[in-house]
Amino acid sequence: MPVQPRRAYESDAATATVRLSGVGFGYAATHRALRDVSLTLPAGSFHFLTGASGAGKSTLLKLLTLAEHPTVGTLHLFGEDATTATRRALPAFRRRMGVVFQDFRLLDHLSAFDNVALPLRLTGRKQADYAGDVEEMLDWVGLGDRMDDAPPSFSGGEKQRLAIARAVVTRPDLILADEPTGSVDAAMAERLLKLFQTLNRLGTTVLIASHDEALAERSGATVLRLEGGRLIGGAT
Amino acid sequence: MIRRLLNARPSLLPRDAGGEAWLAGLIAVLCFLACLSAVGAVSADRAAHGWARELRSEATVQVRPRVGETGAEAAARAAQTLAGVEGVSEAEAMDRETAEALLRPWIGDAVLPDLPIPQLVTVRLDLTAPASAVTLGRALAEAGLDATVDDHSLWRGEVERSAGLITLLAAAAFLLTASAAGAAVAYATRAGMAAQSGVINTLSLNGASDGAIAGLYQARYGLLAAGAGAIGALVAMLLIAALRFLGGAEGVTPALPLAWSDLLILSPCPLLAGTVALVAARFTALARLKRGH
């Protein structure tokens, strides 16, 4: 992966990559998935988000990907208010982030190459310009020999690596990953963690939601913990 | 690998072979019908204009003889007078045999010999600057002839109104067909988006704008409709060419004279079908995306 100059680590809340203030969210009036969550992810920081199933990890990631809007509170991304971002404004935010979904969300009718190339293609770049980057990324996640195969023929671990390759191929400012090591063995989990750490060293802000507390501890990253929709530790 | 080397990129939308084949078939049939409507309108308009031109090129004068003058003498004098009027190419008194031949199909032979037949003069008018009924009437009056001029304007008006009505009906049929095609594409777009909601979510979360997603649907259905429109137009062209070949310049019926140039009218059909589908797909997709598809 070509090395780019590392960006300065920003701790100023105004220029933080992510800033949530008193955010709450409920799928129904009686059920609050998130309550009064306030946190700041400075540019270039690396955080793990842990918590039991139903604690609100995935919901928090949905808010950060702007798939949902906070019911209360404010959300700033890349220094801009995204609390009530309109659909027109979404692409500009989303093109600066790479997301690894728990259910991968790969396009089964496309090859591995075309799945990884998707975010590059959506920016309007020509295939000749990005083909090298995509092939390099697929090699890096160990799928270089399966570029032309479609996701249905992949194992769960392979799909996960493919989803990670797609999320990071644009070298985004922010990486959000929901259980990115959930379907891979320990060796691959370590390798993927190193990939995230490498990207972080290059200046990318990383937030990984995971059950794997041990991996979170080993990563040396700041660990945020959600319980019953409340952030109980590690918030900046 | 070969595709990548050729720089060909697959569509970001999965194929729905069954639904698309159904839609293509429907659009091809609609385009075929629209083509027939268009050619029918042009043909009817051509027939009506032909008839109107013939009516405009002639006038009929009924002459009433004066005391001491026979009907044939009065008609001959009227023909002579009218032949000298500017805007008249030819004026000819109709003899009794010709007049009887015109009436025979309606009233038969039995009563014709006893029937008083009016004295008529057939006037052929100069098409570039035809003399008006008023001019003809004035010339006849100045010559001391008691006559009535019929310039066929009543019939001509009826024919032109009928042609206008047929053209309007054909235009309405064309608009209805285009609306039906647009509605079919809108329905297919909605069904496609419902079936592909996961794909649309993935595209959106990877940075695709609503316009880009709508663009995928407009390209897919626009191309599909253009292809289907080409097939419908081609079948209509073959049918019209066969009718023209069998019927000659007069067409199969004088009411619908066909010309080889009519085939050219059908050439924009694929473009029109593609445009209608493109617009319908884009607006449907954008509306659904706005509502959260």
Image: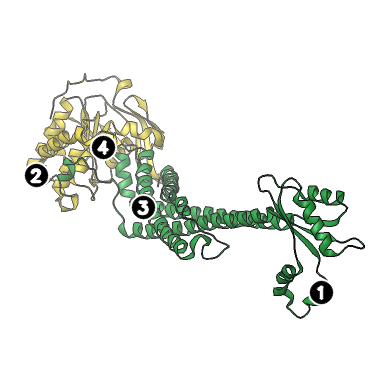
Chain colours: A yellow, B green
Q: What residue is shown with label 1?
A: B115
- Measure the C-alpha gap from mark 1 to mark 4: 91 Å
Q: What residue is shown with label 3?
A: B227
Q: Which mark is residue B126?
A: none
- Measure the C-alpha gap from mark 3 to mark 4: 27 Å
Mark 2 or mark 4, which is nearer the start of the sequence? 4
What subunit carries mark 3? B
What subunit carries mark 2? A
Q: What residue is shown with label 2?
A: A145
- Measure the C-alpha gap from mark 2 to mark 3: 38 Å
Marks 4/2 in contact by CB < 8 Å: the verdict is: no
Q: Secondary structure at mark 1?
A: loop
Q: What residue is shown with label 4?
A: A121
Where in the figure is residue B7, as x and y percent of width and height? Answer: 20, 40
* Crowding near the residue tagged with mark 1, few <14, some 14–19, many ≥20 C-alpha atoms within 10 Å: few
Marks 3/4 in contact by CB < 8 Å: the verdict is: no
For badge 4, the amino acid type reads: Arg
Where in the figure is residue A120, as x and y percent of width and height? Answer: 24, 35
* Crowding near the residue tagged with mark 2, few <14, some 14–19, many ≥20 C-alpha atoms within 10 Å: few
The residue nearer to you, when weighing B236 against A102, is: B236
For badge 2, the amino acid type reads: Asp
Say if residue B30 shows up in the picture: yes
For badge 1, the amino acid type reads: Leu
